[in-house]
Image (tube, rainbow, N blue to C red):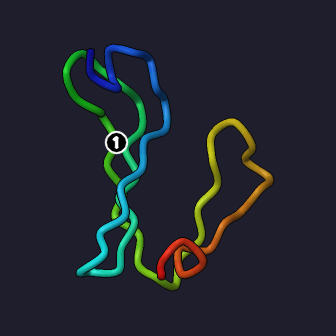
Amino acid sequence: MTAQQAGIADYRVLGMNGRQLHVFRDPAGDAYATHLTLAESATVSPLAAPAAAVRVADLLP
């Protein structure tokens, strides 16, 4: 079962080499309709807690 099929609405992948965060949202079939690529200087909020902002830099080693 894929993340999309499981209904995971907010899926994230850290790109260590590019120091980026890839955020996938809006599951649609076998893919996600939305793919955001965020730089180290950006912030992101989970869909479940939109008031909680996390800096991408804080997620990276």
Q: Name the residue located 24 percent from the left edge and 80 percent from the top edge.
A: 17
Which quadrant of the figure has residue 19? bottom left
Residue 11 image point, x, y percent? 43, 41
Q: Residue furthest right?
A: 51
At numbered mark 1, what does the secondary structure look like: helix, strand or loop?
A: strand
Q: Name the residue located 54 percent from the left edge and 81 percent from the top edge.
A: 57
Location of residue 8 with respect to 34 vertically, above or below? above
Does residue 61 appear left or right of residue 20 in this picture? Answer: right
Location of residue 2 with respect to 47 vertically, above or below? above
1 vs 9, nearest the viewer = 1
Q: Name the residue located 33 percent from the left edge and 23 percent from the top edge.
A: 4
Which quadrant of the figure has residue 52? bottom right
Q: Residue furthest front?
A: 61
In the picture of the structure, the residue carrying the numbered disc 1 is: 34
Which quadrant of the figure has residue 53? bottom right
Query: Looking at the figure, which quarter contains the N terminus?
Result: top left
Q: Residue furthest left?
A: 30
41 vs 58, nearest the viewer = 58
Q: Name the residue located 26 percent from the left edge and 81 percent from the top edge.
A: 18
The three-letter amino acid code for the residue at tag 1 is Thr
Location of residue 59 with respect to 48 vertically, above or below? below
| Tally of marks | 1
Residue 9 image point, x, y percent? 48, 29
| Mark 1 residue crowding within 10 angstroms, few (<14) / some (14–19) / many (20+) | few
Residue 44 image point, x, y percent? 58, 62
